[in-house]
Amino acid sequence: MDAIPAPPEQHEVVDKGKKKKDAIRKRLRRMVENSSGEGSDKMIGKEDAERFDVSFAAFLKLGHYLFAHSKMANLHQVEFSKALCEAQAEIERIQAEVERLKMASKE
C-alpha cells in the first residue's frame, strides 16, 4: 500500500495562518489610520479589524479540520476500494468453483 503523507501538524498550519493574518491585520490598520475622516470612522475600522481577526481565525481552524477530514475520507476510500476488489476476486473464485462443480456433476 502506498504511503499517504501525513497532514501538516496543527501548529504549522496555525503558524502560516498567523503570519498571513498578521500581514492582513497590518495592512488593514494602515488603511484605517490613513483614511481621512473623523474618529468614529477609525473606531468602526478597529471594530471591523477585530471582527476580521476572529473570522479569519475561525476560517483557519475550519480549513485545518476540512483538510484533516479530507485526508481521512481519502484513506477510507482507498481501504474501501481494496476491500471491494478483494470481494470481487472472491466472488469470481467462488463462481469458477461452482462452474467446475457443475461440470464435474454432469460427467
Image (tube, helix red, strand yellow):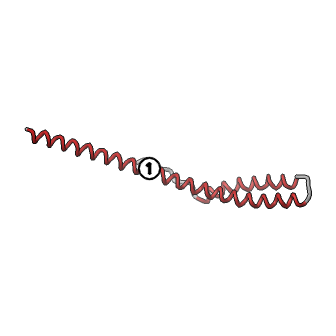
Does residue 17 appear to the left or right of 42 in the view shown?
left
Identify the amino acid type marked 1: Gln
**Residue 102 picture location, percent across and down:** 14, 41
State the image quarter where residue 26 is shown.
Answer: bottom right
- Quadrant of the image containing the C terminus: top left
Residue shown at 74% from the left, 60% from the top: 51
In the picture as drawn, the residue positioned furthest to the left comes out as: 107
**Residue 14 picture location, percent across and down:** 64, 58
State the image quarter where residue 105 is shown.
Answer: top left
Does residue 68 appear to the left or right of 45 in the view shown?
left
Residue shown at 44% from the left, 49% from the top: 77
Say above or below: 79 vs 50.
above
Say above or below: 58 vs 95.
below
Does residue 92 appear to the left or right of 39 in the view shown?
left
Q: Name the residue under label 1.
A: 77
Give the structural element (helix, strand or loop) at label 1: helix
Say above or below: 54 vs 88.
below
Does residue 65 appear to the left or right of 74 in the view shown?
right
Residue shown at 91% from the left, 55% from the top: 37
**Residue 50 picture location, percent across and down:** 76, 61
Q: Residues within 10 Å of mark 1 (few under 14, many from 20)?
A: few
Of residue 42 and residue 106, the one placed in the foreground of this image is 106
Residue shown at 57% from the left, 54% from the top: 66
**Residue 38 picture location, percent across and down:** 92, 58
